[in-house]
Image: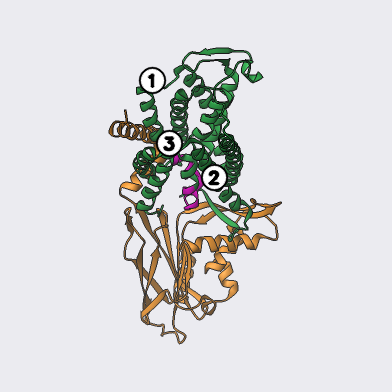
Chain colours: A orange, B green
Amino acid sequence: MRLLGIVLIALVCATSTAAETLITSLSNHRVLITSNYTGTSIAVFGAIERDAQTIARATGYDVVVTVRGPRQLLTVREKQQIGPIWINREQQKFPEAPAYLSVLTSKPIEEITSVQLRQRQKIGLEAIINAPDFTNERGGGADREFREALYRLRAQEGLYLEEERGVTFLTPDIFRANIPLPATAPPGEYDVQVILFADTVILASTTTHFELVKTGFEEQIGSIARDWSLLYGLATALLAIAFGWIASVIFRRD
Amino acid sequence: MPVSVLLILGMGAAVGFISGLFGIGGGFLMTPLLIFLGIPPAVAVATQSAQIVASSTTSVLGAIRRKALDHKLGAILVAGGFIGSALGVWFFAAARRAGQLDLVIVTSYVTLFTVVGSLMLKESIREFWTKRRGGTVRLRRQAGEHASYLGWPLRMRFYRSKLYVSVIPILLLSLFIGFAGALLGIGGGFIVVPALLYIFRVPTNVVVGTSQFQIVCTTLVALILHAVMNQAVDMVLAILLIIGGVFGAQFGARIGRNLRAELFRFLLAILLLAVGLRFALELVVQPEEPFSLTIQERRQ
């Protein structure tokens, strides 16, 4: 009973130090993608609520929205020249890399919080990609190059991005952010983490999810190709033979 | 894959035209084109095999109507081809796992095309000169001219092809074709036809039908194996390639009938060398982006 009392007091203290509460909502929890899809975006809305004792912060609030797509095992390989030819040599694996990663901030991330906090809490693209547990340890000196290559290759596809004006404040307490989802974004579960800062300190954070679902003709074919590969192979073969036969009938030369 | 439908149809028609012109499958041109277009080599190779099945089916049916098919020789070729295909698809998967598939495909293309291309070029130039000097080109079989390996054990009689040779070199040939076909997304017609003609001296009227019969069977197996083991077959892409190819081939064949044989072989040799050279450049030129990324599996 006493223990519970202590816990309760501790809880009250904890909430009272963080006088702000963060409320966030997504415009959509399920994004449907059809085959003619060229990319879309979903919006995050957030409101900051202060309790009665707290006054507005002089420095104002900052928000960092981090979106992580489904996890993938990625391998980055580097071509090196051996004799006259270029061939894949060194490789580095990233076992739990998100398929999609975007960081949207209300101002440049360096101005929001310190390097130490970013590295510890994995806030910002740089901190996430350079986190020690992001890759299987190679111990080699080229480690940095591989991380940079991963970022560069994914950024080219629009899958990894950081936008320093991605979060806009509509009023001092209400903000919104647009999460761009390119056509290359794979289906799966996406986590949206919203962190509220004031004066380089984390005040509150929330995590919500949305799901990217592919529908339509192409996706159905794709899932059949994966799950019913023998049937798919046979069907393609039959189709090919049928086409060949039709052609021989139409263009009969003798 | 964000590739234009019209572009694929157009390419299918263009390659079909050339294949109809030269009486070959065209896989050896289409697969490289797809790769140059940015389609992953694995998908290009696996999908192209569907197009080969379609075009070979057409020519086999034609050959059956003309009775230009040696069933017995075809069956032996198919047997070797099946084993070769299975080995090829297995090797394909292994190379893909090791991250060296692109290298394997590109190097094989370079080697195969430069070797076959230069042999054909040499042959056609020699033929051209003999004809100019007024000499006759020797094509008929002459007595006592058989190479020694044709007399190896397990000799068999092939009536329609007027052959009495050992099965072993035929099996080896078809094994190699099956392997190369599955690995490179080619039917192999441009190797089988000259091999049957020049090495085994099979009569010309039987050669094309029989080799196409072998190609249809082995590519069919390769296609299904690729779908099951590598999941690299793209049905939509396949249909586009087939439709483009079917029409192109008909026009090509019509024009091909007016083309002189040695000129024809010369052009084909140049074509092969050009594709081989293009691939060689790919290997030698320093890549703009030395790093590449592969997704091995998706974790939820």
In the picture shown, does residue B100 fall above or below A132? above
Mark 2–mark 3 CB contact (< 8 Å): no
**Nearest the eye: A254 or B64:** A254
Q: Is residue A152 magenta?
A: no
Q: Earlier in the sequence, mark 2 or mark 3?
A: 3
Q: Residues within 10 Å of mark 1 (few under 14, many from 20)?
A: few
Q: Residue furthest left?
A: A250
Dot in front, 2 or 3: 2
Place residue B256 in its image quadrant. top left
In depth, the one of B168 and B50 nearer the eye is B168
| Badge 1 and badge 3 both on one subunit | yes
Q: Which residue is mark 3?
A: B52
**Are the residues flagged by discs 1 and 2 from a single subunit?**
yes
Chain of the residue under the numbered disc 2 shown in the image: B
Instruction: Look at mark 2 in the image and give the residue it sits on.
Output: B270
Task: Please state which amino acid type lies under the numbered disc 2.
Answer: Ile
Amino acid type at mark 1: Lys
Residue at the (47%, 16%) spot, across then down: B72
User: Which quadrant of the structure image shows residue B244?
Assistant: top left
**Distance from the alpha carbon under mark 1 to that under mark 2:** 33 Å
Q: Residue at x 38, y 79 (%)?
A: A169
- Secondary structure mainly formed by the magenta segment: helix
Nearest-to-viewer mark from 1 and 3: 1
Of the residues under marks 1 and 3, which one precedes in the sequence? 3
Position of residue A180 in the picture relative to residue B106 (left or right): left
**Numbered range of the magenta stretch:** B33-50
Q: Is residue A25 above or below residue A235?
A: below
Q: Secondary structure at mark 1?
A: loop
- Residue B291 horizontal/vertical position (percent): 59, 57
- Residue A144 in picture, x, y percent from top left: 64, 63
